[in-house]
Image: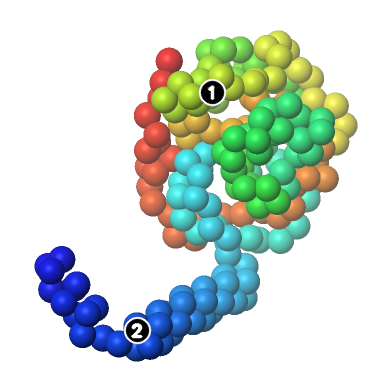
């Protein structure tokens, strides 16, 4: 197969190869633009992290009033005030400026207990919420929010994601509710993809 492709390449003049390459690039750019316009028109966003199931999520408008258990689109917290977010941006764990899809675990007035073993909201343990010490492969130690009991103040929200190596409030703490952009719902996702990365120690 390799020798055949080399033979074909030798037969084609350089100008023809350049022409084909240019049209391939144009085709990719056009397809990318069409997909972008379609997603914008249908209010869809794509999640490629394993915090939540990988796939498309539909944005449903205003998230207010906020309720625990809801799925939402979230603006990334400011790295200047959140050491874990600054660390994530430094090591490119997520792109800067791209909103996240997360669950609201707790809102104003609720109590969160954060421990290595996981997160409890008003006494109820959140599934798969154990706080990780290391990134996959033990490449980097992960900064987490101080363990303890937190009673959420007015305007605070605690975020949660059920996937393995989920980056949520266990690492950067509660965020202002003004960072919640819209309600969201799965549109087309891959079930179980949030568990693709195996849990470490």
Q: Residue at x 75, y 39 (%)?
A: 77
Tag in front: 2 or 1: 2
Q: Left or right: where does residue 121 sit relative to residue 30?
A: right
Q: Which image quadrant for residue 106?
A: top right
Which corner quadrant holds the N terminus?
A: bottom left
Query: Does residue 110 lie above or below 50 as drawn?
Result: above
x%, y% of residue 55?
46, 55
Q: Left or right: where does residue 63 sit relative to residue 136?
A: right
x%, y% of residue 91?
59, 35
Residue highlighted by disc 1: 140
Q: Residue at x 66, y 38 (%)?
A: 89
Front-most of residues 156 and 139: 139
Query: Does residue 33 lie above or below 107 as drawn?
Result: below
x%, y% of residue 88?
63, 34
Which corner quadrant holds the C terminus?
A: top left
Q: Which image quadrant for residue 39?
A: bottom right
Q: Residues within 10 Å of mark 2 (few under 14, many from 20)?
A: few
Q: CA distance from mark 2 to mark 1?
A: 46 Å
Q: Earlier in the sequence, mark 2 or mark 1?
A: 2
On the question of residue 163 being in view, the answer is yes
Q: Residues within 10 Å of mark 1 (few under 14, many from 20)?
A: few
Q: Residue at x 52, y 76 (%)?
A: 29
Tag of residue 14: 2
x%, y% of residue 102?
61, 42
On the question of residue 160 being in view, the answer is no
SS state under label 1:
loop
Query: Does residue 54 lie above or below 200 as drawn?
Result: below
In this figure, what is the number of numbered marks? 2
């Amino acid at each position: 197969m390799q020798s055949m492709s080399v033979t074909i390449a030798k037969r084609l003049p350089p100008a023809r190869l350049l022409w084909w390459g240019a049209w391939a690039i144009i085709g990719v750019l056009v397809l990318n633009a069409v997909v972008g316009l379609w997603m914008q028109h249908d209010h869809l966003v794509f999640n490629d992290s394993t915090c939540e199931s990988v796939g498309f999520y539909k944005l449903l408008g205003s998230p207010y009033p906020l309720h625990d258990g809801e799925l939402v689109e979230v603006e990334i917290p400011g790295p200047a005030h959140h050491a874990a977010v600054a660390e994530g941006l430094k090591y490119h764990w997520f792109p800067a400026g791209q909103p996240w899809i997360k669950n609201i675990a707790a809102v104003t007035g609720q109590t969160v207990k954060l421990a290595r073993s996981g997160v409890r909201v008003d006494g109820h343990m959140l599934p798969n919420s154990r706080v990780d010490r290391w990134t996959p492969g033990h490449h980097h130690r992960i900064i987490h929010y101080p363990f303890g009991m937190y009673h959420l103040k007015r305007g605070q929200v605690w975020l949660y994601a059920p996937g393995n190596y989920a980056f949520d409030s266990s690492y950067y703490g509660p965020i202002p509710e003004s960072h919640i952009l819209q309600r969201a719902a799965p549109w087309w996702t891959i079930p179980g993809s949030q568990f693709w990365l195996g849990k470490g120690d």
